[in-house]
Image (cartoon, rainbow, N blue to C red):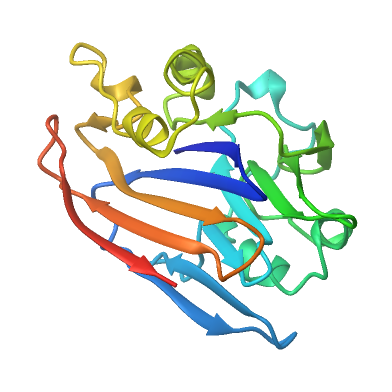
Amino acid sequence: MCTISIVPVENGYRVMHSRDELRSRSPEQAPAWRMLENGKTACWPTDTDAGGTWVAVREDGFYLGLVNLNLNDDELDPGLPEAFHISRGTLIPQLMEADDVEDALKRLTTMDLRGMKPFRLLLVGPVEGGGFASAIARFGGVHVTLPAPFEPVVRPRCLASSGLGDHLVQCRLPLFREMVVPDPSPENQRAFHFHQWPDKLEYSVLMSRENARTSSVTSVEHTGTDLPNVVYESVAEACPEADPVGSEMLQ
């Protein structure tokens, strides 16, 4: 259950990732920079219960963001397992070891993902000649596909999901086109991620329902020079009027 938005900035990109999670889950751990086996450093928050993460960025701007894929039974891959025992969040730390987006996609298509629930994965990385490109991979429970082509980060994009069913939160996409696309400023992008419909809190970007709520918003901005700028904001559990209760900037 998440919302991801990505917009182009000069020489790079900015991503914001709202994480929606069950109230019964333990508080997540704020992002921290760590050394990878490939000798590079990467930053990500941690799911305290499962040990994985939903978003990560590397020193070179290579970014991964995961949203759950909640579809009707007839939309899922045939042969979907009856039981799931592997956290989707364990995928991102593994793929952070890839050389680039293309290598990460190759690794993803050859990994054994049986036992993992369906998801979509946004991949962003530098390309030869300068600039950044993105791709969206889809795992329907059995197979990995690339429904969206690998393309330069030159336009705003948004992904939304909900445990109630992804089709029920597609109302967030017209809102994104209204609030962000005409002027993808940091202020407008943040306002989108903290937007609530008072009469539709369960479908809002800053969502709230009896057993779940938006738990955090993580922003990643990379302009191709220094380390990516990572800002993490935890969100109060006192919904419906959820307010940021803390923020941390990491560089």
Q: Is residue 134 left or right of residue 241?
A: right
Q: Is residue 161 left or right of residue 155?
A: left
Question: Is residue 90 at all visible to an observer of this figure?
Answer: no
Residue 130 drawn above or below residue 164: below
Residue 28's spot in the image, x, y percent?
32, 64
Q: Is residue 83 left or right of residue 138?
A: left
Residue 48 drawn above or below residue 37: above
Dividing the picture into quadrants, the one containing residue 122 is top right
Q: How many marks?
A: 0
Residue 64's spot in the image, x, y percent?
63, 55
Residue 187's spot in the image, x, y percent?
35, 35
Q: Quadrant of the N terminus?
A: top left
Nearest to the observer: residue 187 or residue 145: 187
Nearest to the observer: residue 110 or residue 4: 4
Residue 184's spot in the image, x, y percent?
50, 29
The residue depicted at 74 percent of the width and 74 percent of the height is 97
Q: Quadrant of the C terminus?
A: bottom left
Question: Is residue 55 at all visible to an observer of this figure?
Answer: yes
The residue depicted at 58 percent of the width and 70 percent of the height is 226
Nearest to the observer: residue 128 or residue 3: 128
The residue depicted at 70 percent of the width and 19 percent of the height is 74
Residue 236 drawn above or below residue 176: below
Dividing the picture into quadrants, the one containing residue 249 is bottom left
